[in-house]
Image (cartoon, rainbow, N blue to C red):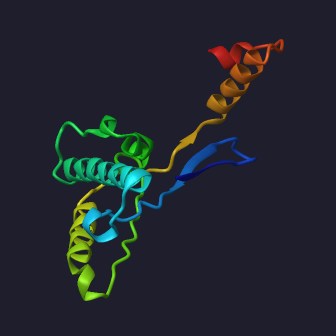
Amino acid sequence: IFSVLVESKNKSTGAVALGKLTLVDLAGSERQSKTQATGERLKEAKSINMSLSALGDVISALSTGEKFVPYRNNLLTRLLQDGLGGNAKTLMFVNISPADYNSEETCTSLQYAQRVKMITNDAAKASESAEVAKLKGVISDLKKGKHVEVADDVVG
C-alpha cells in the first residue's frame, strides 16, 4: 500500500484543497493446490486470501447498499476505507491470464471487478476556507508551544 497526501492552497483566496492517492497491489488469490506452498509461503497465501475475502465482503456491502459495511474485519479494509466508500473516486485494474489453466481465476477476477463496478460514491472536492486553514495553523503553533496572538475576528 502506497499513499500520497496532497494539499494545495489557492494564494488569492486562501482556500485549501486536500486529496489522497492510494495505490494498492492486491496480488492474486493463492491456491495451495496450484502453488504447492508450504510453511511461511502458505501462511502468507492464507493471509492474502483472508484480506481479499474481507475486501470482497466490503465491496459486496457497498455495491448492494447495505447499511453496515464491515470495514473493521481486516487491516486492508480499514486502510482502504476512505477510498472505497463516500467521498472518493476509486479505480480498479484487473489483470487476467489468457492461459486456459487459469480460466477459473480469470472468471473469479472478472466477477470481483463487476461487483466493484456496482459501487457508487459521491466524490466532491474537499476544500476548506481560509479561516479554517488559519485556525489549523494556530492549533499547530500551539501544539509546538509557540505563543499565539488570536485576533477577535478569528475566534468570532
Residue at screen point 24% across, 87% down: 100
The residue furthest right is 147
In front here: 41 or 59?
41
Residue 133 lies in what quarter of the image? Answer: top right
Along the viewing direction, whichever of 9 and 97 lies nearer the viewer: 97
User: 76 or 144, which lies in front?
Assistant: 76
Kindly identify the residue that appears in the image at 36 percent across and 61 percent down: 37
Residue 146 lies left or right of residue 83; in this view the side is right
Q: Residue at (66%, 26%) from the top-left corner? A: 136
Residue 60 showing in the rendered view: yes
The image shows residue 63 at horizontal and vertical percentages of 21, 54
Residue 152: image quadrant is top right
Figure disc tally: 0
Q: Position of residue 59 (x, y in %)?
A: 26, 53
- Tell me where residue 95 appears, x and y as whole percent: 38, 75
In this picture, residue 149 sits left or right of residue 76 = right
Residue 153, placed above or below residue 137: above
For this view, does 68 lie left or right of residue 27?
left
Front-most of residues 101 and 69: 101
Q: Is residue 138 above or below residue 47?
A: above
Which image quarter holds the C terminus?
top right
Res 74 → quadrant = top left
Let me know if residue 123 appears in the view: no
